Image: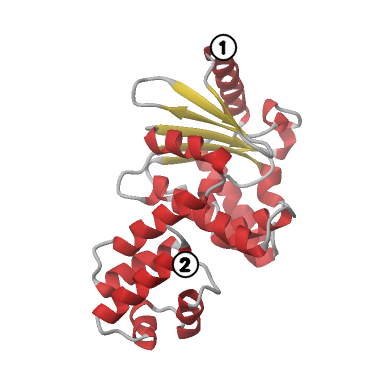
Amino acid sequence: MNGDMWIRALKAARAGAGVSQEALAELIRWSPSTIAAIETGRRRPTPQFAEAADAALDTGGLLAELLAVAARQESPAWFAPWRAIEAEAVALRTVQPSLVPGLLQTEAYAHAVLSAQGTHTPEQVDQLVAGRLARQELLTGPAPKRFTAVVDETALRRVVGDRDVQLAQLERLAELATLPHVRLYVIPAGVGAHPGLAGGFVLANLPDGDEVAYIDGVFGQIVDRPDTVDTIRTMWDTLLGEALPVGVSVELIGKLVNEL
Protein backbone atom coordinates (compact mmCIF):
# COMPACT_ATOMS: atom_id res chain seq x y z
CA MET A 1 0.00 0.00 0.00
CA ASN A 2 1.29 3.49 -0.84
CA GLY A 3 0.45 7.00 0.26
CA ASP A 4 -1.93 7.60 -2.67
CA MET A 5 -4.07 4.65 -1.60
CA TRP A 6 -4.22 5.99 1.97
CA ILE A 7 -5.33 9.39 0.69
CA ARG A 8 -8.08 7.72 -1.36
CA ALA A 9 -9.20 5.87 1.75
CA LEU A 10 -9.37 9.13 3.72
CA LYS A 11 -11.34 10.88 0.98
CA ALA A 12 -13.74 7.93 0.69
CA ALA A 13 -14.28 7.87 4.45
CA ARG A 14 -14.89 11.60 4.51
CA ALA A 15 -17.31 11.45 1.56
CA GLY A 16 -19.13 8.48 3.07
CA ALA A 17 -19.66 10.43 6.28
CA GLY A 18 -20.73 13.56 4.37
CA VAL A 19 -17.95 15.61 5.97
CA SER A 20 -16.12 18.38 4.11
CA GLN A 21 -12.46 19.21 4.62
CA GLU A 22 -13.47 22.26 6.63
CA ALA A 23 -15.88 20.27 8.80
CA LEU A 24 -13.26 17.59 9.43
CA ALA A 25 -10.76 20.28 10.41
CA GLU A 26 -13.20 21.60 12.98
CA LEU A 27 -13.98 18.14 14.33
CA ILE A 28 -10.38 17.08 14.88
CA ARG A 29 -8.93 20.55 15.59
CA TRP A 30 -6.51 20.45 12.66
CA SER A 31 -6.25 23.38 10.26
CA PRO A 32 -8.09 23.12 6.90
CA SER A 33 -4.80 23.88 5.14
CA THR A 34 -3.17 20.87 6.80
CA ILE A 35 -5.98 18.56 5.71
CA ALA A 36 -5.80 19.95 2.18
CA ALA A 37 -2.03 19.39 2.13
CA ILE A 38 -2.49 15.78 3.29
CA GLU A 39 -5.20 15.05 0.73
CA THR A 40 -3.05 16.43 -2.10
CA GLY A 41 0.03 14.49 -0.97
CA ARG A 42 2.01 17.61 -0.03
CA ARG A 43 2.18 16.57 3.62
CA ARG A 44 2.47 13.15 5.22
CA PRO A 45 -0.27 12.14 7.65
CA THR A 46 0.86 11.24 11.16
CA PRO A 47 -0.54 8.39 13.28
CA GLN A 48 -2.14 11.04 15.52
CA PHE A 49 -3.93 12.57 12.52
CA ALA A 50 -5.16 9.16 11.35
CA GLU A 51 -6.47 8.31 14.81
CA ALA A 52 -8.28 11.63 15.08
CA ALA A 53 -9.81 11.19 11.61
CA ASP A 54 -10.93 7.65 12.51
CA ALA A 55 -12.72 8.97 15.59
CA ALA A 56 -14.36 11.82 13.70
CA LEU A 57 -15.43 9.71 10.71
CA ASP A 58 -16.35 6.61 12.75
CA THR A 59 -14.16 4.31 10.66
CA GLY A 60 -13.30 1.91 13.48
CA GLY A 61 -9.55 2.52 13.35
CA LEU A 62 -9.26 1.74 9.62
CA LEU A 63 -7.26 4.83 8.67
CA ALA A 64 -4.74 4.31 11.48
CA GLU A 65 -4.29 0.67 10.52
CA LEU A 66 -3.86 1.47 6.82
CA LEU A 67 -1.30 4.14 7.68
CA ALA A 68 0.63 1.67 9.84
CA VAL A 69 0.65 -0.84 6.97
CA ALA A 70 1.92 1.82 4.57
CA ALA A 71 4.64 2.85 7.01
CA ARG A 72 5.81 -0.74 7.42
CA GLN A 73 6.07 -1.12 3.67
CA GLU A 74 8.03 2.13 3.38
CA SER A 75 10.73 1.16 5.89
CA PRO A 76 14.18 0.44 4.42
CA ALA A 77 14.41 -3.18 3.35
CA TRP A 78 17.42 -3.79 5.63
CA PHE A 79 15.37 -2.66 8.64
CA ALA A 80 12.34 -4.88 7.99
CA PRO A 81 13.69 -7.95 9.87
CA TRP A 82 14.21 -5.89 13.03
CA ARG A 83 10.70 -4.44 12.81
CA ALA A 84 9.37 -7.98 12.90
CA ILE A 85 11.52 -8.81 15.93
CA GLU A 86 10.57 -5.72 17.95
CA ALA A 87 6.90 -6.30 17.15
CA GLU A 88 7.19 -9.82 18.59
CA ALA A 89 9.25 -8.81 21.64
CA VAL A 90 7.74 -8.54 25.10
CA ALA A 91 10.38 -6.07 26.30
CA LEU A 92 12.91 -3.74 24.69
CA ARG A 93 16.02 -2.21 26.26
CA THR A 94 17.99 0.44 24.41
CA VAL A 95 21.13 2.49 24.88
CA GLN A 96 21.63 5.72 22.93
CA PRO A 97 24.74 7.85 23.51
CA SER A 98 24.11 10.63 21.00
CA LEU A 99 20.38 10.94 20.31
CA VAL A 100 16.98 10.43 21.87
CA PRO A 101 15.87 6.84 21.04
CA GLY A 102 13.71 6.62 17.92
CA LEU A 103 10.70 5.18 19.74
CA LEU A 104 10.68 8.27 21.99
CA GLN A 105 11.22 10.93 19.31
CA THR A 106 8.74 13.62 18.39
CA GLU A 107 7.87 14.11 14.74
CA ALA A 108 9.90 17.32 14.48
CA TYR A 109 12.94 15.81 16.22
CA ALA A 110 12.85 12.71 14.00
CA HIS A 111 12.53 14.91 10.91
CA ALA A 112 15.58 16.95 11.95
CA VAL A 113 17.65 13.81 12.67
CA LEU A 114 16.80 12.09 9.39
CA SER A 115 17.21 15.26 7.33
CA ALA A 116 20.68 15.81 8.80
CA GLN A 117 21.93 12.52 7.34
CA GLY A 118 22.08 14.19 3.93
CA THR A 119 21.33 10.93 2.10
CA HIS A 120 17.55 11.23 1.67
CA THR A 121 15.29 13.38 -0.47
CA PRO A 122 12.63 15.39 1.38
CA GLU A 123 10.05 12.84 0.27
CA GLN A 124 12.16 9.97 1.61
CA VAL A 125 12.63 11.81 4.92
CA ASP A 126 8.85 12.17 5.21
CA GLN A 127 8.42 8.45 4.57
CA LEU A 128 11.04 7.50 7.15
CA VAL A 129 9.53 9.82 9.74
CA ALA A 130 6.09 8.31 9.16
CA GLY A 131 7.53 4.84 9.63
CA ARG A 132 9.27 5.85 12.86
CA LEU A 133 6.09 7.40 14.27
CA ALA A 134 4.09 4.32 13.34
CA ARG A 135 6.55 2.13 15.26
CA GLN A 136 5.86 4.15 18.40
CA GLU A 137 2.59 2.27 18.76
CA LEU A 138 4.84 -0.36 20.36
CA LEU A 139 4.83 1.96 23.38
CA THR A 140 1.57 3.86 23.07
CA GLY A 141 -0.76 1.27 21.51
CA PRO A 142 -3.26 -1.02 23.25
CA ALA A 143 -0.63 -3.68 24.05
CA PRO A 144 2.53 -1.68 24.86
CA LYS A 145 5.94 -3.27 25.29
CA ARG A 146 8.01 -2.92 28.43
CA PHE A 147 10.58 -0.35 27.39
CA THR A 148 13.75 0.72 29.17
CA ALA A 149 16.11 3.34 27.77
CA VAL A 150 19.53 4.54 28.89
CA VAL A 151 20.40 7.90 27.35
CA ASP A 152 23.55 9.96 27.71
CA GLU A 153 23.04 13.45 29.16
CA THR A 154 24.96 14.93 26.25
CA ALA A 155 22.27 13.58 23.89
CA LEU A 156 19.64 15.48 25.87
CA ARG A 157 21.67 18.68 25.81
CA ARG A 158 22.35 18.55 22.07
CA VAL A 159 19.93 20.92 20.35
CA VAL A 160 18.49 19.04 17.38
CA GLY A 161 16.55 21.14 14.87
CA ASP A 162 16.22 24.25 17.00
CA ARG A 163 15.42 25.26 20.55
CA ASP A 164 11.66 24.71 20.16
CA VAL A 165 12.18 21.24 18.69
CA GLN A 166 14.54 20.25 21.48
CA LEU A 167 12.24 21.68 24.17
CA ALA A 168 9.24 19.76 22.84
CA GLN A 169 11.36 16.61 22.71
CA LEU A 170 12.46 16.93 26.34
CA GLU A 171 8.87 17.57 27.41
CA ARG A 172 7.80 14.47 25.48
CA LEU A 173 10.45 12.41 27.28
CA ALA A 174 9.19 13.61 30.65
CA GLU A 175 5.64 12.69 29.63
CA LEU A 176 6.56 9.20 28.40
CA ALA A 177 8.59 8.54 31.55
CA THR A 178 5.33 8.64 33.54
CA LEU A 179 3.97 5.59 31.71
CA PRO A 180 4.10 2.46 33.90
CA HIS A 181 5.80 0.36 31.20
CA VAL A 182 8.50 2.94 30.35
CA ARG A 183 11.66 3.45 32.40
CA LEU A 184 14.16 6.13 31.44
CA TYR A 185 17.69 6.41 32.83
CA VAL A 186 20.21 9.17 32.13
CA ILE A 187 23.97 8.72 32.30
CA PRO A 188 25.31 12.02 33.68
CA ALA A 189 27.95 13.80 31.64
CA GLY A 190 30.33 13.60 34.60
CA VAL A 191 30.68 9.83 34.15
CA GLY A 192 33.09 10.37 31.28
CA ALA A 193 33.92 7.39 29.10
CA HIS A 194 31.52 4.45 29.21
CA PRO A 195 30.76 1.39 26.99
CA GLY A 196 27.80 3.10 25.32
CA LEU A 197 30.07 5.58 23.57
CA ALA A 198 30.98 2.81 21.14
CA GLY A 199 27.44 3.04 19.73
CA GLY A 200 23.79 2.48 20.48
CA PHE A 201 22.06 -0.87 20.64
CA VAL A 202 18.75 -2.51 21.50
CA LEU A 203 18.09 -5.78 23.32
CA ALA A 204 14.78 -7.51 22.54
CA ASN A 205 13.35 -10.12 24.91
CA LEU A 206 11.26 -12.58 22.93
CA PRO A 207 8.27 -14.57 24.24
CA ASP A 208 10.28 -17.82 24.27
CA GLY A 209 12.92 -16.29 26.55
CA ASP A 210 15.53 -15.71 23.84
CA GLU A 211 17.25 -12.36 23.38
CA VAL A 212 18.21 -10.71 20.12
CA ALA A 213 20.26 -7.53 19.75
CA TYR A 214 20.24 -4.75 17.20
CA ILE A 215 23.41 -2.69 16.82
CA ASP A 216 23.00 0.82 15.44
CA GLY A 217 24.98 2.04 12.45
CA VAL A 218 24.49 3.42 8.98
CA PHE A 219 22.93 0.03 8.29
CA GLY A 220 21.86 -1.68 11.48
CA GLN A 221 22.99 -5.19 12.34
CA ILE A 222 20.89 -7.88 14.01
CA VAL A 223 22.86 -10.16 16.35
CA ASP A 224 21.60 -13.42 17.84
CA ARG A 225 24.81 -15.36 18.55
CA PRO A 226 24.59 -16.23 22.28
CA ASP A 227 28.16 -15.14 23.05
CA THR A 228 27.72 -11.78 21.33
CA VAL A 229 24.34 -11.19 22.98
CA ASP A 230 25.99 -12.01 26.34
CA THR A 231 28.62 -9.34 25.68
CA ILE A 232 25.98 -6.76 24.83
CA ARG A 233 23.99 -7.71 27.94
CA THR A 234 27.12 -7.17 30.04
CA MET A 235 27.51 -3.73 28.47
CA TRP A 236 23.88 -3.01 29.32
CA ASP A 237 24.40 -3.96 32.97
CA THR A 238 27.49 -1.74 33.17
CA LEU A 239 25.67 1.22 31.66
CA LEU A 240 22.66 0.78 33.92
CA GLY A 241 25.04 0.90 36.86
CA GLU A 242 26.47 4.22 35.66
CA ALA A 243 23.06 5.81 35.14
CA LEU A 244 21.10 7.96 37.56
CA PRO A 245 18.02 6.38 39.21
CA VAL A 246 14.76 6.83 37.31
CA GLY A 247 13.43 9.58 39.58
CA VAL A 248 16.66 11.55 39.46
CA SER A 249 16.86 11.06 35.69
CA VAL A 250 13.40 12.54 35.22
CA GLU A 251 14.33 15.43 37.50
CA LEU A 252 17.39 16.10 35.33
CA ILE A 253 15.19 16.20 32.23
CA GLY A 254 12.97 18.73 33.98
CA LYS A 255 16.03 20.81 34.78
CA LEU A 256 17.10 20.75 31.13
CA VAL A 257 13.61 21.88 30.11
CA ASN A 258 13.92 24.87 32.41
CA GLU A 259 17.38 25.67 31.08
CA LEU A 260 16.05 25.89 27.53
Q: Amino acid at mark 2?
A: Pro
Query: Crowding at label 1, few (<14), some or many (≥20) Cα neighbours within 10 Å?
Result: few
Q: Secondary structure at mark 1?
A: helix
Quadrant assignment for the N terminus = bottom left
Point 51% across, 47% down: residue: 103
Q: Amino acid at mark 1?
A: Asp
Give the x, y percent position of residue 196.
Answer: 67, 30
Whether residue 165 is situated above or below residue 197 in the rendered picture: below
Quadrant assignment for the C terminus = bottom right
Give the x, y percent position of residue 108.
Answer: 59, 62
Point 34% across, 26% down: residue: 207
Mark toward the start of the polypeptide (2 vs 1): 2
Q: Which residue is mark 1?
A: 227
Give the x, y percent position of residue 129.
Answer: 56, 57
**Residue 230 location, quadrant:** top right
In the picture, the disc for residue 45 is 2
Question: 132 or 100, which lies in front?
Answer: 132
Question: 220 or 107, which lies in front?
Answer: 220
Colouring: secondary structure
Using the rendered image of the protein, determine whether residue 175 is visible from the camera's viewpoint: no
Q: CA distance from mark 2 to mark 1?
A: 42 Å
In the picture, the disc for residue 105 is none
Point 73% across, 36% down: residue: 190
Query: Crowding at label 2, few (<14), some or many (≥20) Cα neighbours within 10 Å?
Result: many
Whether residue 178 is situated above or below residue 37 in the rendered picture: above
Q: Secondary structure at mark 2?
A: loop
Q: Is residue 99 left or right of residue 223?
A: right
Q: Nearer the viewer's eye, disc 2 or disc 1?
A: 2
Point 35% across, 43% down: residue: 144
